[in-house]
């Protein structure tokens, strides 16, 4: 039952007699973390009804800026037009990062030629100009075989896609269109794991769970400040920032009006206290300890600030 | 005006199925408590006319009536006439047996039930009475709660007649009511018609010249949508005015 | 009594009119957004451009690839479901004993009630690998698998509703046919099926509508690559896939990109409208009346 | 070969083909079911059915999901069936073949072709925003009602159409009003066909995920809804959510939830089939 | 064995609808090229027996036959008998008109078409011939391509007869074929039956005693599922052996 405390126990104390309800919606990427937090929070404050929806970061922000929800899960930062919409409704907010997601470049396990790949090569593959032109492996590196390359990637509308294009091509939402896209990362896992000529990318958790069917490719950003040479994604390399540029932060957004309610404040604090353990548990990479402290301070300030208003 | 007490009158009646002119300028007056038979070759409009008498053709798309039909002097196609009440007044029995897919009992008492009658005893009594009138009681009394569809064609038709009688209308229209019946049942129905005309006005379509001769007081002969001749049955059968009637009655037609 | 009849008729009328209100509401929702869309994108481009890349850097707003994808999966689905469904309907009605029919019909109807998410994964993880053995060049995401599975899903729509229509044909007609020495096949296709044609056409309309509007199966198994092709072995994208993709995804609401789903939606609407009117016309023209 | 022999051969061939077609559907169904049973059956226990959702596959349950599904089903039935059957009856028995009727008819066929996701958009705007129902059960049920309405109307009409004219004639001739004829004769006689439509409509509603996602049905609801204004989740959304998780254990959960979802459909279908057969036996001509 | 050339024989025939025993131990032998009439009160099993003669009851669930029916000495219920060929041999006309929802022409040539005949001229000739035989040609010759359902009841029934004649069977079964016809058409059909019996064996169910008397060579009287009496029509009508027959024929029944 959900009332049991977890074996590891949770951090922070919550007043037992809290009531009320908290509505959360948004990113599917962030959902598992928030779900885990909500589940644990329920053990602490059983009378607070926390609900979590999945309507994508965009869908979440839409509801958020209308004031329909208290917290928005997001796998990207809010866009100016979304922020404007919130302002129109007299909603101010705070962005809190809660964990990292490492985008992983993968190939089929039988692929024995790709040992590593550079950001420049990834750009060559994925940029809009590649459309209809880069079709063979040896067009990327001459020593790679003269075989077709089959591309798999996140759906164009996902935060994952946004982030990947931003990081690799240099411009958000800018890539070739002739690849197999799916919103559902399991579908991509399925695609890559059955196609020896595949190259794809998706969230780290999906790679981690399917390591036997996939092969991750170390990525070299040719910037020694972030660690030398090509680096494989892992808990450590993402956490310490050496797996660059393909690790991205995940966020929750808190509505100013909601911070007037003690249960929301308690929940957000609880979230930041436990995000490290819980995010790892569901397949994401926690941020360093001090960053959580920073986020907590940021929230405290925001909450007291909006309380004064 | 007419001195006699006419139950049903048609005045300059024309009927159309879309553009097909099915009844042409019919003028007829049917006496109360008498049996009027409609005869004529297939397709001449007998059924059509019969069905205008209780407005059953209202539901056929494209069907249109001109002229008047008077029941007790009141136009049944007038605006303020309620078809459902008209039909309680003017009952009908059809050419093909059409029992409801319900029990025999439910079939007979249907007309009463929709009038709101609920008293079980009255319903049962009426059912028995109507079934006896149609000589069906002995055959079905043990299976009143069985489906009416399991009966044979003849039994079904008699059930339909019983069903019409149960609401005791003042006029009964019958469209070849015995064409699916054996002579015994037919004889019983004819007998019944004889009895009923003491209280009811009956209009019957029949192909059976003998039957028309036996049961009817008046006979109307239709041909191609026209009323060729209308007279006392005896008169018509013995000395028809028109040659066509004569030919038809004696079977020398065509 | 009369008042009661009036009230009942009024209520029934109201229920019927509600369907108009729903349509009006749908059209309103679709139109209000797509009007703004078409103020930015020319309708000519929309109808003639051969590329659909509204979310990419180089934007093209040609709906044709999505329409082609939709037609392709639907055609495959109907090619599977119509012969099988109609055969089942005829078989159950004319050949099989009554008790067999009574068990088989509901069993088949189960096929229509399996959640489409499940079908999608079935298409992707079972049907596609199987077909790849037969057609080695078959892509991992393709219109063929999705269409076939969708066809299987809509079999019961055609078989059940057509069977109902056929069994509603009066027994006397069947007897007339047998009485002339017809075989069961001749009775079925010479007399029963034509007599039930209006019901059968209705069942096929419903099936096509379902196929055109089906989302999860194609979204999972047919791919998400808008492509103007009639080749069922490569990844394509349907209108519905596009809509669900965007509405589940990350596009900021109120943007031009977001409005594309309403433009796509209204296309789908117009498309089904034309289709339905056509079948309606066919039905009117060939409907046989019997008593 | 004589023509008669040819005809008989064709007849036989079709029979074989008919058996083949009938069983191909069933075989695929069997493959589905066995596949899912193998995967999910072991996961189903009392805890699975009575537990709240969780991040741990082994602890996650479907209590709120099936409760939400039942709520949605009941409310959708209550809203859509009377409305759909009433509209079908009006169109078939009452409306003259006017332009309005024609328009309505085409309109309904069109509604049947509108993809569910568009109903989701409509529901979100109309019920969620304008009526202020948000992501409540009522909003979900209203949305699904609109979705299944055309199916019910079309099949109701077809069923009513199959009732012979002579039955109506008989009833009218006994003085029955239009409504009495409809209520006492036409509806009972066509009930079997109407139920078939209702079965298809229900099974459609129970498997829908997309429109409910759009109107804002949730994935994580840690309480059982107690009123139509509560927020909710349903089994298909739970399944969809679980199948998109990285951890393979959740796929087992999804299979188990599919079994439960199918079970609910089977029970519903079973009731409807039972009723249908009962009616069909009584109504034969 | 029998010296005569019997076309149709029933031997110890019993038939059941589920548990209902509809035909009881029927033994009858019908002569070739003669008209045999079945008479008897409603529900006595005439239609049931007629329909077992071309196995039309095969399709009724729960219907079961015991005993033999021989056509030209061969058991029609034998394993190797093909029902479709049997039915081409033994044509049938039903009680209620049941035209196909097709054109008039298509109705008449249906039987030929399903046999694979495609020659337009032959089809047209056969259609005309059959329609003339049933006195329908003049009425429908201008609307052969119109739906058969637009005809009146009587016209429909005559069309069904024409349809049966078009495949020129050797036996024709008729279940009250004229019960929906007017006297003129009836007379024509009776005439036709008279002509046809030169080439065909005809079995006719009828409620019309006069008709049985006029058209049939032999008459079989059924009562409650039993064959009470079977004899030359003249003999039966003038000196019936059984009192029941006598009562029925004279209408003193019940
Ligand atoms: N619903 C209809 N639509 C169009 N024409 C019709 C319709 N019903 C009957 N008719 C035509 O109207 C004419 C008269 O038909 P009606 O049924 O009244 O004839 P009838 O005298 O009753 O014939 P029968 O003795 O065969 O029953 C016929 O020519 C028939 O074809
Ligand atoms: N399908 C059926 N199922 C059960 N019983 C039936 C069925 N058809 C006929 N019967 C019964 O079998 C008996 C004989 O019926 P049949 O139709 O042969 O009578 P019939 O002599 O032709 O009567 P009619 O003159 O009224 O047509 C009747 O009692 C009838 O109720
Ligand atoms: Mg008539
Ligand atoms: Mg009979
Ligand atoms: O659901 P998203 O994380 O892709 O916005």
Image (spheres, coloured by chain):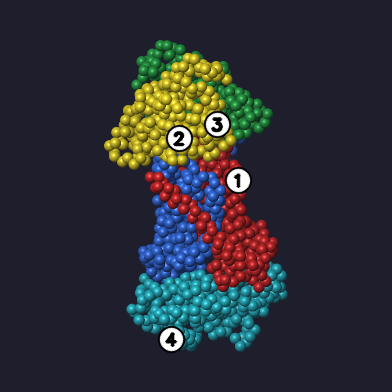
Chain colours: A cyan, B yellow, C red, D blue, E green
Q: Secondary structure at mark 4?
A: helix
| Image vertical order of residue B185 relative to residue D38, above or below | above
Numbered mark located on residue B22 in the image: 3
Q: In this rendering, which labeled residue sits more in front, label 2 or label 1?
A: 2
Q: Secondary structure at mark 1?
A: helix
Note whether residue C82 is visible: yes
Q: In this rendering, which labeled residue sits more in front, label 4 or label 2?
A: 2
User: Where residue D167 sits in the image (x, y, percent)?
Assistant: 44, 38
Q: In this rendering, which labeled residue sits more in front, label 2 or label 3?
A: 2
What is the distance, in whole Å, between disc 2 and disc 3 at their CAs?
20 Å
Q: In this rendering, which labeled residue sits more in front, label 1 or label 3?
A: 3
Check chain identity for marks 2 and 1: say if they share one. no
Residue at 64%, 58% (x, y): give it.
C68
Check chain identity for marks 1 and 3: say if they share one. no
Ligand 5 has an atom within 8 Å of the beta carbon of the residue at disc 4: no
Do the CB atoms of the residues marked 1 and 3 lie less than 8 Å apart? Answer: no
Residue B98 vs residue B223: left or right? left
Ligand 1 has an atom within 8 Å of the beta carbon of the residue at disc 3: yes
**For residue E110, which quarter of the picture?**
top right
Q: Residues within 10 Å of mark 3 (few under 14, many from 20)?
A: many
For the C terminus of chain E, the image quarter is: top left
Residue at numbered disc 4: A308
| Image vertical order of residue B109 relative to residue D212, above or below | above
Q: In this rendering, which labeled residue sits more in front, label 3 or label 4?
A: 3
Residue at numbered disc 1: C282
What is the distance, in whole Å, between disc 3 and disc 4 at their CAs?
90 Å
Check chain identity for marks 3 and 4: say if they share one. no
Q: A282 and D202: which one is in front? A: D202
Residue at numbered disc 2: B75
């Amino acid at each position: 039952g959900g009332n049991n405390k977890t074996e590891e126990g949770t951090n922070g104390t919550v007043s037992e007699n809290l009531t009320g309800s908290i509505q959360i919606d948004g990113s599917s990427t962030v959902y598992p973390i928030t779900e885990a937090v909500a589940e644990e929070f329920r053990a602490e404050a059983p009378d607070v009804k926390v609900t979590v929806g999945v309507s994508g970061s965009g869908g979440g922000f839409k509801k958020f800026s209308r004031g329909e929800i208290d917290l928005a899960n997001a796998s990207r930062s809010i866009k100016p037009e979304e922020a404007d919409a919130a302002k129109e409704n007299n909603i101010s907010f705070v962005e809190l990062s809660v964990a990292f997601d490492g985008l992983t470049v993968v190939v089929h396990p039988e692929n024995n030629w790709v040992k590593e790949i550079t950001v420049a090569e990834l750009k060559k593959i994925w940029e809009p100009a590649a459309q209809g032109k880069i079709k063979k492996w040896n067009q990327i590196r001459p020593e790679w075989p003269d075989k077709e390359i089959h591309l798999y990637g996140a759906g164009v509308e996902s935060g994952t896609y946004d982030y990947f294009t931003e990081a690799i091509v240099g411009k958000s939402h800018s890539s070739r269109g002739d690849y197999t896209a799916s919103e559902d990362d399991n579908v991509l896992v399925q695609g890559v794991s059955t196609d020896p000529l595949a190259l794809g990318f998706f969230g780290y958790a999906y790679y981690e769970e399917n390591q036997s069917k996939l092969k991750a490719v170390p990525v070299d950003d040719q910037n020694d400040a972030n660690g030398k040479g090509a680096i494989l994604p892992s808990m450590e390399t993402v956490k310490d920032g050496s797996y660059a540029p393909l690790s991205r932060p995940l966020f929750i957004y808190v509505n100013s009006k909601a911070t007037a309610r003690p249960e929301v404040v308690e929940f957000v604090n609880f979230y930041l206290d436990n995000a490290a353990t819980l995010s790892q548990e569901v397949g994401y990479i926690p941020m360093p300890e001090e960053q959580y402290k920073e986020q907590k301070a940021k929230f405290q300030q925001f909450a007291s600030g909006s309380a004064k208003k | 005006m007419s001195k006699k007490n006419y139950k049903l009158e048609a005045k300059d009646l024309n009927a159309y199925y879309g553009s097909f002119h099915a009844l042409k300028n019919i003028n007829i007056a049917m006496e109360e408590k008498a049996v009027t038979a409609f005869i004529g070759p297939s397709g001449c409009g007998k059924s059509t006319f019969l069905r205008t008498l209780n407005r059953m053709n209202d539901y056929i798309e494209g069907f249109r009536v001109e002229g008047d039909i008077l029941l007790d002097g009141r136009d049944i196609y007038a605006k303020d006439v309620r078809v459902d009440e008209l039909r309680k007044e003017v009952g009908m029995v059809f050419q093909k047996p059409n029992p409801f897919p319900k029990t025999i009992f439910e079939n007979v008492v249907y007309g009463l039930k929709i009038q709101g009658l609920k008293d079980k005893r009255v319903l049962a009594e009426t059912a028995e009475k109507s079934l006896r009138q149609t000589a069906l009681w002995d055959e079905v009394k043990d299976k009143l709660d069985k489906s009416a569809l399991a009966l044979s064609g003849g039994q079904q038709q008699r059930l339909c007649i019983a069903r019409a009688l149960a609401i005791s209308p003042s006029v009964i229209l019958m469209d070849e009511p015995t064409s699916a019946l054996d002579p015994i049942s037919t004889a019983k129905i004819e007998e019944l018609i004889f009895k009923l005309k003491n209280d009811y006005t009956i209009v019957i379509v029949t192909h059976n010249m003998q039957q028309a001769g036996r049961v009817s007081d008046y006979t109307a002969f239709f041909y191609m949508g026209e009323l060729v001749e209308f007279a006392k049955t005896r008169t018509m059968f013995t000395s028809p005015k028109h040659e066509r009637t004569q030919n038809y009655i004696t079977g020398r037609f065509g | 009594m009369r008042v009661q009849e009036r009230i009942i008729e009024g209520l029934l009328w109201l229920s019927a009119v509600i369907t108009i209100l729903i349509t009006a509401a749908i059209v309103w929702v679709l139109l209000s957004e797509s009007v703004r869309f078409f103020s930015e994108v020319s309708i000519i481009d929309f109808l003639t451009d051969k590329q659909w890349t509204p979310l990419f850097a180089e934007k093209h707003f040609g709906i044709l690839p999505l329409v082609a994808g939709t037609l392709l999966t639907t055609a495959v689905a109907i090619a599977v479901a119509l012969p099988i469904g109609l055969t089942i309907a005829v078989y159950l009605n004319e050949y099989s004993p009554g008790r067999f029919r009574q068990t088989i019909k509901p069993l088949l109807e189960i096929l229509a009630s399996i959640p489409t998410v499940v079908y999608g994964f079935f298409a992707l993880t079972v049907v596609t690998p199987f077909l790849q053995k037969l057609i080695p060049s078959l892509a991992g995401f393709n219109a063929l698998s999705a269409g076939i599975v969708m066809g299987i899903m809509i079999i019961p729509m055609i078989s059940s509703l057509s069977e109902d229509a056929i069994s509603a044909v009066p027994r006397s007609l069947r007897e007339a046919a047998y009485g002339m020495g017809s075989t069961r096949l001749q009775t079925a296709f010479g007399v029963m099926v034509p007599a039930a044609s209006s019901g059968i056409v209705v069942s096929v309309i419903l099936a096509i509508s379902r196929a055109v509007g089906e989302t999860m199966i194609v979204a999972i198994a047919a791919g998400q690559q808008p492509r103007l092709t009639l080749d069922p072995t490569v990844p394509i994208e349907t209108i519905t896939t596009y809509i669900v993709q965007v509405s589940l995804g990350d596009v900021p609401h109120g943007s031009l990109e977001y409005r594309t789903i309403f433009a796509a939606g209204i296309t789908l609407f117009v498309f089904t409208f034309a289709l339905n009117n056509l079948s309606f016309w066919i039905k009117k023209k060939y409907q046989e009346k019997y008593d | 070969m004589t023509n008669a022999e040819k005809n008989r051969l064709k007849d036989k061939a079709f029979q074989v083909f008919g058996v083949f077609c009938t069983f191909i559907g069933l075989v695929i169904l069997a493959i589905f079911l066995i596949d899912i049973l193998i995967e999910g059956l072991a996961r189903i226990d009392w805890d699975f059915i009575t537990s709240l959702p969780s991040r741990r596959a082994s602890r996650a349950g479907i209590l709120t999901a099936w409760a939400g599904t039942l709520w949605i089903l009941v409310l959708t039935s209550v809203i859509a069936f009377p409305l759909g059957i009433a509209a079908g009856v009006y169109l078939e028995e009452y409306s003259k073949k006017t332009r309005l009727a024609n328009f309505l008819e085409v309109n309904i066929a069109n509604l049947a072709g509108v993809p569910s996701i568009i109903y989701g958009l409509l529901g979100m705007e109309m019920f969620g925003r304008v009526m202020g129902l948000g992501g409540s059960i009522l909003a979900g049920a209203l949305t699904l009602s609109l979705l299944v309405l055309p199916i019910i109307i079309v099949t109701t009409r077809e069923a009513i159409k199959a009732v012979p004219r002579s039955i109506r004639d008989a009833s009218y001739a006994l003085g029955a009003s239009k409504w009495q004829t409809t209520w006492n004769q036409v509806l009972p006689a066509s009930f079997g066909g109407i139920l078939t439509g209702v079965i298809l409509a229900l099974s459609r509603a129970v498997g829908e995920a997309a429109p409910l996602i759009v109107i804002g049905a949730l994935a994580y609801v840690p309480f059982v809804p107690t009123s139509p204004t509560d927020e909710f989740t349903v089994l298909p959304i739970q399944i969809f959510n679980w199948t998109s998780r990285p951890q393979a254990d959740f796929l087992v959960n999804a299979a188990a939830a599919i079994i439960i979802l199918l079970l609910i459909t089977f029970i519903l279908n079973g009731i409807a089939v039972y009723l249908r057969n009962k009616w069909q036996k009584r109504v034969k001509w």
